[in-house]
Amino acid sequence: MTTKRKRKIKNKTRKISNKVPTINSNFDSGSIKTLSIKNSNTNTHFHISLQKEIIREGNKSQYWFYFKVSNVLGRNCFFSLKTHIDCNNGFKHLGIATSYDNEKWFLTPSKQKNKRKTKCKINKKKYTYTKSTQEVNWKIKPTKNIVWFAYYVPYPLERIYKLGNLMSKKSFVKQNTIGYSHGNRPIKMLTIGNGCRNVWLICRQHPGESIASWILEGFLKSIFSPLPNLKIHVVMTLNPDGIFLGNWYVNKNGINLNLDWKSKKSKEVKCLSKLLDKQYNDLIVDIHGDEECKQHFVSHCPTQNIELYKRVNKLLNTHNDHFQKTDYYKKLGFPCDGKTLDFLENTLTLEGCMKFKSKNNTTPEKEGLKVGATILKLLKSLF
């Protein structure tokens, strides 16, 4: 190789942005708070924290963040993220979702630093967990000038609406608006088929659990014809405000929708509850994401249909070996007090693992898509 060619490659690797690095989360589902940005030579230290949510009831843990940094090409970027109350170790061994184009994602390793440990209680019961003030750190030397970061691969509100419009073009799918959120955003539902048995898939009660939408997309893109005898109702998001605002647990008014099924204070739960009460429902699947477990799992309220739970759990494990057979929440001792959706008859909660360790290093959302395809296999086997 000539000296001129060597010098050209050497100069190319030294290319560094000479503009001041910035942070921005002012977009659909974006959320972060900038504490400081410190530059020295080719290094940039970003000190950030989670945007604090007003959570009226239930677990106060927060995990969601989604932001982009600009003018960072070739710089050594160090991120220190201050977190709030954490009862479930949701940042432990977290791979930070990272993208150069906001479309293709990969994971950047992080380290968790505990500063203080005490004990906390859930729902004023005796269940105790490790509680800590934490700092999560990661570093990267970007090969492009703009980089996006998130707790998990995002699924913004705009993409949800686009998916609904795409599916509604199929002859056996109808889309309608079943109500409006507190922020006057439409709550969309797809109806697939016209059978006599009612199945519901309900998504994103908790807006930060974006894996739920990837699971739903995997289901919808796997279905090419209506299933015999089934009428499938798909609520694509019950919490459009929370998604757009970049919340983790709550809607615009600070209500955790999955703790509102007894009191029905929110407009979102009220509108869906009226529809669920109109007919007998053979199966309701409430799709969530879990930030601590190592595999996907199904949870249920012990006072409800135990035989349905056993059949569904067995079939899911048969069709997808990334599911675990045990109910992870049962081990933690979560109460079944009638506040959550799974207290309704024939309702199960499907929890997608948000920190699933892929053996072949596939991007995180692909695991969610596979779970969605598994749900379709489940319905074909179950009915």
Image (cartoon, grey):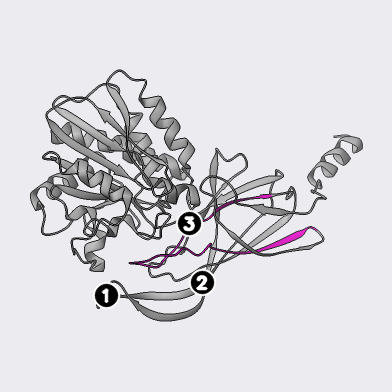
Q: In the displayed structure, does residue 141 sit left or right of residue 120?
A: right
Residue type, mark 1 in image = Tyr
Is 82 magenta? The answer is no
Q: Quarter holding the C terminus?
A: top left
Closer to the camera, 63 or 369? 63
Residue 293: which numbered mark, if any? none
In the rendered structure, which disc, 2 or 3, sits on the residue that comes first in sequence? Answer: 3
In the rendered structure, which disc, 1 or 2, sits on the residue that comes first in sequence? Answer: 1
Q: Is residue 10 above or below residue 292?
A: above
**Badge 1 element:** loop
Closer to the camera, 185 or 338? 185
Q: Quadrant location of residue 6?
A: top right
Question: Residue placed at 91% from the left, 38% from the top?
Answer: 3
**Which residue is the site of mark 3?**
64
Closer to the camera, 86 or 317? 86
**Badge 2 element:** strand
Q: Is residue 351 above or below residue 200?
A: below
Question: Residue placed at 45% from the left, 45% from the top?
Answer: 364
